[in-house]
Image (cartoon, rainbow, N blue to C red):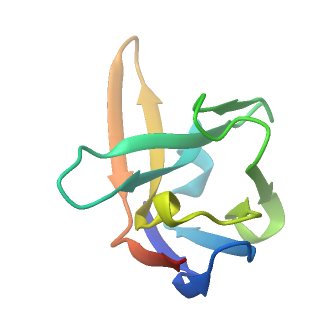
Amino acid sequence: VQLVESGGGLVQAGWSLELSCAASGNTGSIDAMGWYRQAPGTERELVARIYSSGGTHYADSVKGRVTISRDNAKNTVFLHIPSLKPEDTAVYYCNAVVVSGDSDIANYWGQGTQVTVSS
């Protein structure tokens, strides 16, 4: 599975941004896709995840503000972030999870896209 993110950039606080992640390869094996972010000096943290069933999970820090969605036909996942804040500044990474067998879990990562929010 290969993942390519796009949509990052330098934006002003209060603006909206939509990140895209296009998956290729053995996409039929993907059980979930998600977005993580990593700010300087911090650990990578989960932002949101969407499962093959369509269910979603959000980090408490963004719940009610961001939206994860997907276009199955294009094997693409989106992360919509409205009302951007300076604390949203981070490198955003796309993640895909493939579960095989009883407990064999493989994680795939994109190269990351930088989001910088100026105040």
Of residues 81 and 24, the one drawn nearer to the viewer in this rendering: 81
Outermost residue on the front side: it is 119
**Which residue shows up at 36% across the image and 14% down it?**
103
**Quadrant that contains the N terminus:** bottom left
Please state if 57 lies on the left or on the right of 112 as rendered.
Answer: right
Measuring from the top left, give residue 69's x and y in whole percent: 78, 53
Instruction: Using the image, determine if residue 81 lies above or below residue 108.
Output: below
Measuring from the top left, give residue 36's x and y in whole percent: 45, 50
Query: Which quadrant of the structure image shows residue 47?
Result: top right
Instruction: Using the image, determine if residue 34 lies above or below residue 89.
Output: above
Please state if 36 lies on the left or on the right of 85 as rendered.
Answer: left
**Which residue shows up at 80% across the image and 35% down it?**
54
Query: Which quadrant of the structure image shows residue 15?
Result: bottom right
Outermost residue on the bottom side: it is 10
Measuring from the top left, give residue 19's x and y in whole percent: 63, 72
Of residues 52 and 110, the one drawn nearer to the viewer in this rendering: 110
Please state if 35 lies on the left or on the right of 81 as rendered.
Answer: left
Instruction: Using the image, determine if residue 47 lies above or below residue 84.
Output: above
**Which residue shows up at 57% across the image and 56% down it?**
27
**Which residue shows up at 64% across the image and 33% down it?**
58
**Quadrant that contains the C terminus:** bottom right
- Count every numbered label the image shows and give the total: 0
Instruction: Using the image, determine if residue 61 lies above or below residue 72.
Output: above
Measuring from the top left, give residue 14's x and y in whole percent: 73, 72
Outermost residue on the left side: it is 41
